[in-house]
Image (cartoon, helix red, strand yellow):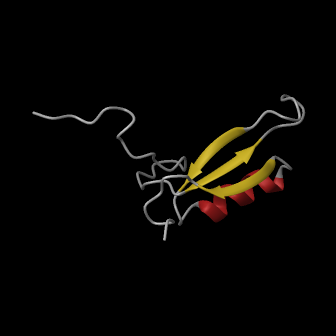
Amino acid sequence: MSSLSPADEPLICSAKECRAVAVWALRWNNPRLHDADRRKTWLACDIHRGSLGDFLDARGFLREVAPLSGSPTLEA
């Protein structure tokens, strides 16, 4: 019986109840709580990239959206 190690398991979208593989990293911080250089990361699938980004952006938290490194759907 083989099992995946945590490093081999796909990263999953941060949207509530979504189980899709993440392909985007939404990097953010709350300037009231975090130093300017600190970044937290939410992961997003293609479907939830916009809604998660809009949520963070509306609060002034979104700093960067980048392809998740190692994503098989984004590497050509």
Q: Along the line of sight, which residue is nearer the eye, 36 or 50?
A: 36
How many numbered dots are placed on residues in this image?
0
The residue that appears at 75% across and 51% down in the rendered structure is 56
Q: From what the image shows, is residue 23 above or below residue 1?
A: below
Residue farthest left in this picture: 1
Coordinates of residue 72 in the picture (x, y in percent): 43, 61
Residue 49: image quadrant is bottom right
Coordinates of residue 17 in the picture (x, y in percent): 45, 48
Coordinates of residue 64 in the picture (x, y in percent): 76, 53
The residue that appears at 37% across and 32% down in the rendered structure is 6
Residue farthest bottom in this picture: 76
Q: From what the image shows, is residue 43 above or below residue 33?
A: below
Say left or right for 27 vs 45: right
The residue that appears at 39% across and 46% down in the rendered structure is 10
Say left or right for 41 vs 16: right
Say left or right for 76 vs 58: left
Residue farthest front in this picture: 76
Q: Along the line of sight, which residue is nearer the eye, 1 or 42?
A: 1
Coordinates of residue 59 in the picture (x, y in percent): 83, 49
Q: From what the image shows, is residue 4 above or below residue 43?
A: above
Q: From what the image shows, is residue 4 above or below residue 58?
A: above
**Quarter in which the N terminus is drawn:** top left
